[in-house]
Image: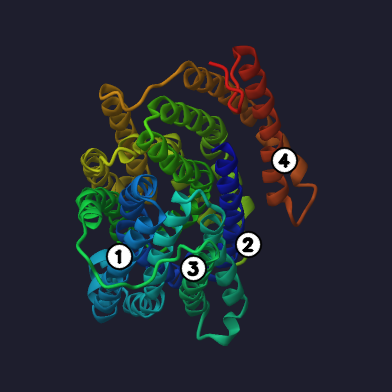
Amino acid sequence: MYKNLFSVAALTLLSRATGFIRDVMLGAILGAGMLADAFYVAFRLPNHFRAIFGEGAFNAAYVPCYSQILAKQGGVAARRFASQIFTLLLLSQIAVLVLALAFTPQLIDLLAPGFRADPEKFATSIALTRITFPYLLFVTLVTLQSGTLNAQGRFTAAAFAPVLLNVVMVLFLAMAFLFPNAGVAAAVGVTISGVCQFALTLWALWRIGIHEHPVLLAWSKEVRHFFVVLGPAVIGSAGVQLALFADTIIASMLPTGGVSSIYYADRIYQLPIGVIGIAAGTVLLPEMSRRLASGDPEGAYHMQNRTMALSIAIAAPCFVAFIMIPDVIMRGVFLRGAFTEQAVQDSAAVLTAYGFGLLAIVLIRSAVASFLAIGDTRTPMLISLFAVGVNIALKVLLFRSMGAAGLATATAVGAWINFGLLIVVGFGRGLMRPDWVLGKTSAVSSIACFVLSLFALLFTLPAAEFASRIGRFENEAELLLLLAGGAIVYSLTLLAGLHLSGVRLRRPLAA
């Protein structure tokens, strides 16, 4: 499992690295003004719906169902089930696309009501959304194919697919002079990337002879069971997306630049979430599903504890960085072209607020795997809805006094409520069995974070003074100096602590 985990994490890191290049280009070309706000709303809308109808709800229901059919009935039955779901998903996404294209102005009114006060921003948002929305159709089918590949123990193509989004967008941004404006170029790149991702995962399935294809619909027992578990998963996933919708809705009421500051901070914030949290959940869910289906619960919980321990150890220094040097990060990554110092400060405040929820969000995917692996989508749904309710209430209370940072603060609080309830309920039902390795790793990571915080306090100013002598690239140099020094300090402290406490996160494992 660790080989798959690091493979997915490495490819996700590649995705985030190419995403940084994409976002640096977007920041330099679009800045944080009207066109940027319009594009980011147009970009987020299909991604919101994808998360509801695609990867969030779908993976939660599909991967355990497919894994159980594959283990108990064999490959032929699993392929038949996958093709039936493919057909249903294709038809549903065509319907969503038709409705979205027909009612785009009403969709913008609903999800970004503040844009109506600016006719140019509103019209631009409508035009860009109609370009980006077909992306949802393709990427939802990619999610299905990725779930099939993952359940088969093949993770490479699915993990590489998001890289294509970034590469294609960069190519289209480089050709922006051929389009009416850079926003249109980026929007076209989004949709074309969906086609490319679909082609990649389809090719990967063809290679192993298990590709899905349209079939005559049959309301089989397996399909009925899938919809039984999909319903709560959709509601639970929709609950999380409601919180993100609330971000978009409320941010649209902030002064111009509010949407953009959230987007740029979120791109930094999503790096550890994608590389660690999503990668861990992607590999852990099919692993736990297989082990539980084969009657090996101890092995399933063994994998879960190691995955969570590894997630904590890797994510903890990112938390410190987001809290201690958010302005250095935003300045080093984005401060160029149309991205101003004011945009740096606004985005840094959002990143700090997001940072307080980082560990919770990274660990949620691993925690929820305990429930999804046994086909329980109802409990995570209820917990998610409660956490989202608190999240949205806090957003409404905080956005006027704290601006975009208030929305991020509410997100962090909601994440901790979600994670905390998953742990309490899971432990109470015997679905989680924490061991000493997890406890020791958490303690050692906390000590290493304290040492890293001292390093940031003592060396941020000297790093800035040294970097100022470089001239043109002083912001990038300051960021690299602090990241490199911090990585060395944290790694040495962590490894020494783990060694002294007798913890081995890789095989052979010591308790």
The tag on residue 66 is none
Which of label 4 and label 3 is nearer to you? 3
Q: Nearer the viewer, residue 377 or 191?
A: 377
Q: Are marks 2 and 4 in contact (CB under 8 Å)?
A: no
| SS of the residue under disc 1 | helix
| SS of the residue under disc 4 | helix
The percent position of residue 75, horizontal first and vertical second, equals 41, 55
- Label 4 to label 3: alpha-carbon separation: 42 Å
The percent position of residue 247, horizontal first and vertical second, equals 32, 54
Look at mark 4 in the image and give the residue it sits on: 481
Residue under the point 50% across and 22% down = 442
Q: Nearer the viewer, residue 245 or 35?
A: 245
Look at mark 2 in the image and give the residue it sits on: 336
Q: Are marks 1 and 3 in contact (CB under 8 Å)?
A: no
Q: Are marks 4 and 3 in contact (CB under 8 Å)?
A: no
Q: Nearer the viewer, residue 69 or 356?
A: 69
Look at mark 1 in the image and give the residue it sits on: 84
The mark nearer the N terminus, 2 or 1, is 1
| SS of the residue under disc 2 | loop
Pointer 3 local density, CA inside 10 Å: few below 14, some 14–19, many at least 20: many
The percent position of residue 92, horizontal first and vertical second, equals 26, 70
- Label 1 to label 3: alpha-carbon separation: 16 Å
Look at mark 3 in the image and give the residue it sits on: 202
- Label 2 to label 1: alpha-carbon separation: 49 Å
Name the amino acid, label 4: Leu
Which of label 4 and label 1 is nearer to you? 1
Which of label 2 and label 1 is nearer to you? 1
Numbered-mark total? 4
